[in-house]
Amino acid sequence: MTTISVDTLRAWLDEQQPVTILDVRLQQDAAEWCIPGSIHVDAYEALKAHDPAALSGVELPTDQPVVTVCGVGRTSQIAAEQLQARGVQALSLEGGMQAWSLAWNTAEVPLDDRSARVIQVRRTGKGCLSYLIGAGEEAFVIDASLDPRVYLDLARSLGWQITSVFDTHIHADHLSRSRQLAERCGAMLFLPDQHRVSFPFTTIRDGDTLTTPHLMLTALRTPGHTPESTCYLLNHALLLTGDTLFPSSIGRPDLHATEEQARERAGALYHSLHKLLALPAETLVLSGHTSTPVPFDGVPLASTLGEIDEQVGLLHATRATFVQMTLARIPPTPPNSQRIVKFNEAGVLPESDLTGLEAGANRCAIS
Ligand SMILES: [Fe+2]
C-alpha cells in the first residue's frame, strides 16, 4: 500500500493514532490551509524535479507511519516513494488537500441543560462548522456542509432521527448539503424568508419558534452578511450565528453584492449585531465558519457574547465608523463564490469536481 484515503487518515486522527503528516506543498499554500499537526517541508520544486535528495535533510520517526501531502496527491506520491526507499513507512494522501477538504471531526458543546446535546461538526479541511442538535429521539441540523451520510450516521449513533434541517443563509463559500440531507431523511427544510432559491422549502421568519419536548429554536433575522441571514437561538442559551458573528470577527457584507449594496448591508449588519448583543452576555455563540484548520481535539469552538463584545472592537464603533471600517477591511473574494451561489440557489450539487469548486480557505470574516 502506497497511498491512504482521506477517510482512513481522518479516522486515524480521530482515534489519536500516532502518525506524522508531512506537507510538501509550496510554503504559501501550506500557510493558507493545512492538516492540523502537519509538518511542512519546502521541497515541492525539488520533488517535482525528481531530485533524489529532495527530502534528505528531513528527520522522521521510524516507529509510526508518515503521510505525505500535496495539493492533489501527485507530488506527495514522489515524496512517499523517496521516503519508502529510506525505509520509512510512508503513504501518500490520495487526492491531496483538495480531497482533504471533506475531512471532518466533532466536538460536543457542554450545556447546563442535560436534556439536549449539541454536536459541533467541523469540516476541518475547509473551516465550515455545522451543528447536530438532539434531544429525546429528535434532532435538528444547522448549516449542513458535508455529505448527508455524515449527519445520518452521527444521529443514528446517538439514537436520534433528524426531523428538521436549517440554513442560516444562502451560502457563497461552500455548497449547502441541507436540501439533500432533508430529502434523505424526510426532514423539514427551513430556510430564511427570501426569493433567491428555486426549490421548495419552509420559510422561517424573524421570531418564528420551533419546539419539541426538549428543544426550542427561535429565529432572529439578522441581515447584513446577506439580506436573508438569520441566527437561531436554542433553548435561550446558545446562539447559532452562521456568518453574522464569529468569536473574534464579524461577517463580510459584500459577497454577491454591488458596492452600494455592500454599504447598505454593512449598515444593516451594525443593527443586527447590536440586536444580538442585547441578549444575555452568557449566551454561547456558535458560528458557521472558522478561518483556521480545526484540530482533532474534541474542544468546541465557541465564545460567549460577553467575550466577543470585549474582543471585537468594531462592535463599539458608531454606525458610520462601523460601516466605513468594515468596507475598508474586506478580504479577497473567495474563489468560485458566484458559481457556488448559483448551485445553492438551485439546490443542486455539481456532478463532478465538487471539492475543486469549493477549493480555498474560508474568507467569510472581517476582523
Ligand atoms: Fe456566508
Image (tube, grey):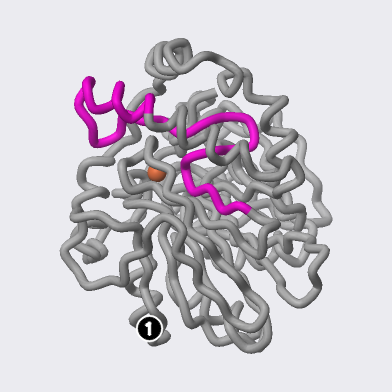
Q: Which residue is mark 1?
A: 184
Question: Is 250 covered by the magenta stretch?
Answer: yes
Q: Residue at x 76, y 53 (%)?
A: 299
Looking at this view, is 113 or 343 the one in front?
A: 113
Looking at this view, is 240 or 98 the one in front?
A: 240
Q: In the image, ligand 1 is in what quadrant?
A: top left
Give the x, y percent position of residue 65.
Answer: 72, 57
Q: Secondary structure at mark 1?
A: helix
Looking at this view, is 133 or 153 the one in front?
A: 133
Q: How many marks?
A: 1
Question: Is 240 covered by the magenta stretch?
Answer: yes
Looking at the figure, which quarter contains the N terminus? bottom right
The residue carrying mark 1 has its beta carbon less than 8 Å from ligand 1: no
Q: Residue at x 38, y 35 (%)?
A: 224
Q: Residue at x 49, y 51 (%)?
A: 231
Q: Quadrant of residue 279?
A: top right
Give the x, y percent position of residue 3.
Answer: 53, 61
Residues packed near mark 1 inside 10 Å, few (<14), some (14 to 19) or many (20 plus): few
Amino acid type at circle 1 is Arg
Q: Is residue 49 left or right of residue 237?
A: left
Looking at the figure, which quarter contains the C terminus? top right
Q: Residue at x 71, y 60 (%)?
A: 107
Q: Is residue 39 left or right of residue 34?
A: right
Magenta-colored span: 239-267
Query: Is residue 171 something one can see in this rendering?
Result: yes
In the rendered image, the vertical position of residue 305 relative to residue 174, given as above or below: above
